[in-house]
Amino acid sequence: MKIQYIAILLLICWGSILKCSAQKVAVKTNLFYGAYSGTPNLGVEWGLSPRTTIELGAGLNWFTPNKASSNKKLVHWLGTMEYRYWTCERFSGHFWGIHIIGTQYNIAGHHLPLLFGDNSSHYRYEGWGAGGGISYGYHFLLSNRWSLEANIGAGYVRLHYDKFRCKTCGEKVGTENRNYFGPTKAAISLIFLIK
């Protein structure tokens, strides 16, 4: 599966980042993603040089509704990695980034026309996605340790999924692939800088 290749790439990057010492580190959460999808998420960003950083982020939503008659859910995990170039200095002002994305999901009852088509709310989708893109962002300093960051990106994601009728234990309609081009990242993040 392609998700395994992304996981291996993330582990290799994680190992190389751990060897960096005496670098500035930031811990963050994407407030926009958390509020929009109800997904707890966390990110860590390391300084690689005075103008470059690398960010690893993850979100996990395992929640399902309590109503037995409803199969509406947005269960998923999402992992991202982004290399950033800062126009002035790291953790200050404008930056450009290149990111990769990996996800696995079980989504039902949600209207997601960009991802699954116009009738997406009538079906359940269980599968994975992998892709990447470019992004732009701005980092706002609030104090010596706290910051806000706005970030938006666009790119490509390959989706592979099984499609089911949107009922509890609905029958499988088929297996599909979809090539998605469009927004791949949107963030308003609260950041704590570790020195």
Image: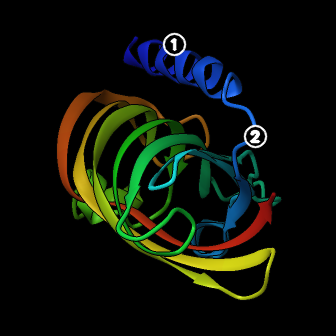
Q: Is residue 159 visible?
A: yes
- Quadrant containing the C terminus is bottom right
Residue that numbered label 1 is attached to: 8
Q: Quadrant of residue 190?
A: bottom right
Q: Tell me the number on the disc at residue 22.
A: 2
Q: Is residue 54 visible?
A: no
Q: CA distance from mark 1 to mark 2?
A: 26 Å
**Amino acid carrying mark 1 in the image:** Ile
Q: Nearer the viewer, residue 58 or 35?
A: 58
For image coordinates 55% across by 42% down, the residue present is 78
Give the left or right position of residue 157, taking residue 73 as reference: left
Q: Residues within 10 Å of mark 2 (few under 14, many from 20)?
A: few
Closer to the camera in the image, 55 or 154? 55
Q: In this picture, is 174 found above or below 67? A: above
Picture coordinates of residue 76 (x, y %)?
A: 60, 43
At mark 1, the secondary structure is helix
172 in relation to 92, above or below: above
Residue in the image at 59% along x and 34% along y: 169
